[in-house]
Amino acid sequence: MKFNKKYRFHRITMNILKGCGLVLLSTTLSAMESLDDSSLQQVTGQAGADLSLKFSLNHDNNANFLCADLLYCRLAVSLNNRYHDGTQDSYDAQGNRIASATGRKQWLVMKGIQGTVNIQELKLDGEDVIYNGTPHAAIKLGFNPAKPIEFRNVGFQSLSIETDTCTESDANCSTGSSNLPGYLTPATPYGGSGFDANKERGFIGVNMNGNLSLTGDVKIFSCGAGHPRC
């Protein structure tokens, strides 16, 4: 009898496991189906959502500049593979310059980049858009003019042109243990106690503070073959 009970329990366990396997298998094989505009119109829901978004770069909680290492608070751009030595550059039939990989690359470096953008309220909702008599389900984004988008200390402290340093001669600084890209040039802050005190050396800076108040809404919807831009 004990053997039969164990055997019966074993069969029940196996049946349960088989049932679970079938449930998991059916769940795995189920696929999502696309909905057209008429099907989307049949979907009903409650009110939308109010979102708040805040983006902060190199700032503390009070939107003050915070950077542990000035070398890594920069944004650098190399335009058209510009090198400091253009003597071996060539030009195509249309007169466009073809830069040669000779000399050291030059960078436009924005030092002390920072900023905080606070979107206090962004309304997310849904609405139908009527085009050529046909309703289209759309995502609706709305704004509250009483809660503007806040910009705090957005910009950079100084701008400069930096050049790669390397030990190679007439090469592109791709090898060598002492090669250093221009955007990692050691920081050299201004001294004293004036406006530029403790800021990196450069020839221009940008700092923006303000509020952007928006009214109206933006509707995003898919369009069919009848729309001129589809």
Image: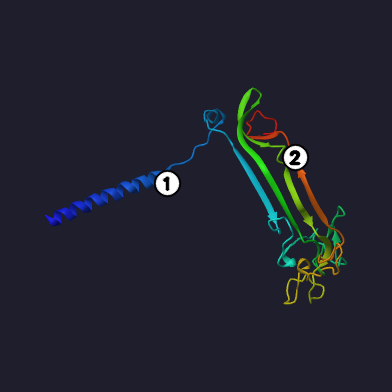
Q: Nearer the viewer, residue 104 or 56?
A: 56
Q: Quadrant of residue 157?
A: bottom right
Residue 134 placement (x, y as % from top left)? 62, 24
Residue 219: numbered disc: none
Provide the residue designation for mark 1. 28
Direction from residue 211 to residue 6 in the image, left or right:
left
Q: Is residue 121 above or below residue 64?
A: above
Quadrant where the C terminus is found in the figure: top right
Q: Residue furthest left?
A: 1
Quadrant where the N terminus is found in the figure: bottom left
Residue 46 placement (x, y as % from top left)? 54, 33
Indicate the amino acid at tag 2: Ser
Indicate the amino acid at tag 1: Thr
Residue 155 placement (x, y as % from top left)? 78, 55
Secondary structure at badge 2 equals loop
Gap in Å between the C-alphas at discs 1 and 2? 48 Å
Provide the residue designation for mark 2. 213
Q: Quadrant of residue 193?
A: bottom right
Residue at 73% from the left image edge and 63% from the top image edge? 73
